[in-house]
């Protein structure tokens, strides 16, 4: 099966741009906040599909998404040195999110709240975010990977 990394990335970005996330975060919609939401969505996506997608293809998808993040940073106007520093921070953040989700049971509400509080750096509306990411996990279980590889989805949950 051929994986369309661009469509998967675009669908994850569409999830990341959900205005409800930022209204409930009660912070400014910044690039860093969007990266955190992208990485939370991506970590759950990888956790769900890691048995379905060969590791080589997962690595290609990860590399593609990291390249897209780097291109976005370049478009903002950062120089090469700043980009390298930011990318190191962002990649380490993603690995940290994945590690936290793997070692804890993200199905448990208490663990969800702990993880979300840590990465969203807020205590406000954590129940909203836990509910949102539960709906996202259910969406992942009800849909196949093929759903994500098609054109941009209407992702409402």
Image (cartoon, rainbow, N blue to C red):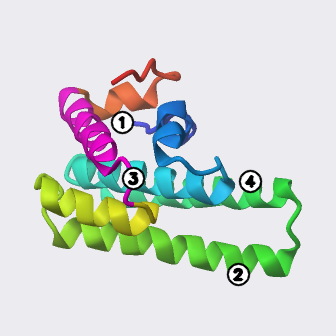
Identify the element where label 2 is drawn.
helix
Q: Earlier in the sequence, mark 3 or mark 1?
A: 1
The reply to whether callout 2 and callout 1 are in contact (CB within 8 Å) is no
Q: CA distance from mark 2 to mark 4?
A: 14 Å
106 lies left or right of 119:
left
Q: CA distance from mark 2 to mark 1?
A: 36 Å
Position of 24 relative to 149 (above/below)? below
Task: Look at mark 3 in the image and give the residue it sits on.
Answer: 124
Q: Nearer the viewer, mark 2 or mark 3?
A: 3
Task: Look at mark 4 in the image and give the residue it sits on.
Answer: 72
Task: Look at mark 2 in the image and give the residue it sits on.
Answer: 85
56 lies left or right of 114:
right
Q: Which residues are magenta?
A: 123-142
Instruction: Report if residue 47 lies within the magenta region.
Output: no
> x%, y% of residue 117?
35, 63
Q: Earlier in the sequence, mark 2 or mark 4?
A: 4
Q: Nearer the viewer, mark 3 or mark 4?
A: 3
Position of 79 relative to 157 (above/below)? below
122 lies left or right of 128:
right
């Amino acid at each position: 099966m051929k994986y369309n990394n661009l469509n998967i990335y675009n669908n994850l970005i569409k999830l990341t741009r959900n205005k409800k996330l930022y209204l409930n975060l009660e912070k400014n919609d910044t690039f860093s906040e969007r990266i955190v939401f992208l990485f939370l969505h991506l970590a759950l996506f990888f956790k769900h599909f890691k048995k379905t997608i060969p590791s080589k293809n997962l690595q290609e998808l990860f590399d593609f998404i990291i390249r897209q993040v780097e291109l976005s940073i370049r478009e903002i106007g950062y120089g090469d040195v700043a980009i390298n520093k930011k990318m190191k921070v962002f990649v380490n953040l993603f690995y940290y999110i994945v590690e936290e989700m793997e070692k804890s049971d993200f199905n448990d509400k208490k663990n969800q709240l702990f993880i979300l509080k840590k990465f969203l750096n807020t205590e406000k509306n954590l129940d909203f975010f836990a509910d949102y990411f539960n709906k996202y996990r259910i969406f992942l279980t009800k849909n196949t990977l093929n759903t994500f590889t098609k054109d941009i989805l209407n992702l409402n949950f």
